[in-house]
Amino acid sequence: MKKKILILAGGISKERLISLDTGLQVAKELKKNGYKVKITEPNSDLSSNIKGFKPDVVFNALHGQFGEDGYIQTILEGFKIPYTHSGVLASSIAMDKEISKKFFRKFKIKTPNSILYSFDKKKKDLLDLINKKLKFPVVVKPKNEGSSVNVFICTRKNIMNILKKMQFYRQVMIEEFIAGREIQVAIMGNKKLGLIELKPKRKFYDYEAKYDIKAETKHIIPVKLPKNKLKEVLNIALKAHKIIKCRGISRSDFKFYNNKFYLLEINTQPGMTKLSLVPEIAAHQGISFINLIKWILKDAAKKK
């Protein structure tokens, strides 16, 4: 008898549309393969949906705040039902870019230098601090969003205007800009699944480059790197997966510059849309989309 799968999708984060797309793609594939599937929003009906549907596993297709930051994971723990991807602690650490960077640095993983900005400094003081610790250009980003939402490359001339637009965040991260190649690595359990290189036509791999097919971002697989460098980046990604204590699938985002890998962040709930990278990496390794989903569900079911 096929299992009943409750898919959590949507939510209130800025990545809502990506989450809905992921949920629909997963639901479509599961239904084709005989699973009983229900999609629900993480709202006030969640409790009644879980109690009424009685799922064997919850597939967490949420992205962004409240979906992959430990919040919904805490709620699901209360229901004592298996759910996909990382648990409470790993999710909260990975989503907070400042905290995850502390882990990377502690375990000797290269990551771009950064500072946190709370909109409490005068222009001159901020510019002096950036010149001292980072140098321009810099990347300005929320410290707890995903999918490159509201990420900007800033110069000395435009940074204050960009920061004004981001004041609805209480705090943002200002990070040194690393040029070079965009490399993404997928980990599946304790297995180094593979990697892919991205060549965006836009300035960098931002939200549009990720999810708008018109952006024409080039996906390169296999990645052309020397064998020792391929091994190195796969090992770094697995190390990051383990130190954050991720479960299931994770995807690590790297820049490769001057023969060095810089880990930008680790994603505990990679997307499953038609443009998503983990399914593409898996397919290159001979793992079909449905078999990838089945593995994720099986992995969730055995968690304690």
Image: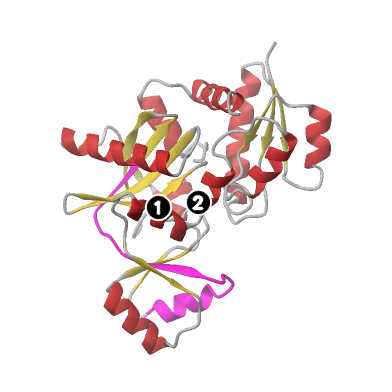
Out of 144 and 36, give the one closest to the viewer.
Answer: 144
* Left or right, residue 204 beside residue 24: left
Query: What amino acid type is highlighted by mark number 1?
Result: Phe
Q: Residue at x 84, y 30 (%)?
A: 52
In what quadrant of the picture does the N terminus appear? top right
- Compared with residue 99, is residue 28 higher up or lower down, i.e. above or below? above
- Compared with residue 277, is residue 5 higher up or lower down, i.e. above or below? above
Mark 2: which secondary structure?
helix
Residue 155 placement (x, y as % from top left): 33, 75
Instruction: Check residue 179 for magenta coloring.
Output: yes
Neighbourhood count class around disc 1 (C-alpha, 10 Å): few under 14, some 14–19, many 20 upward: some
- Compared with residue 72, is residue 247 higher up or lower down, i.e. above or below? above
Residue at image mark 1:
103
Residue stretch in magenta: 158-184
Residue 142 placement (x, y as % from top left): 49, 64
Considering every residue shown, the one lying at the far top of the view is 1
Residue 117 placement (x, y as % from top left): 46, 74
Neighbourhood count class around disc 2 (C-alpha, 10 Å): few under 14, some 14–19, many 20 upward: many
Out of 291 and 107, give the one closest to the viewer.
Answer: 107
Q: Are marks 2 and 1 in contact (CB under 8 Å)?
A: yes
Instruction: Check residue 266 for magenta coloring.
Output: no
Residue at image mark 2:
93
Q: Residue at x 65, y 30 (%)?
A: 82
Query: What amino acid type is highlighted by mark number 2?
Result: Ile
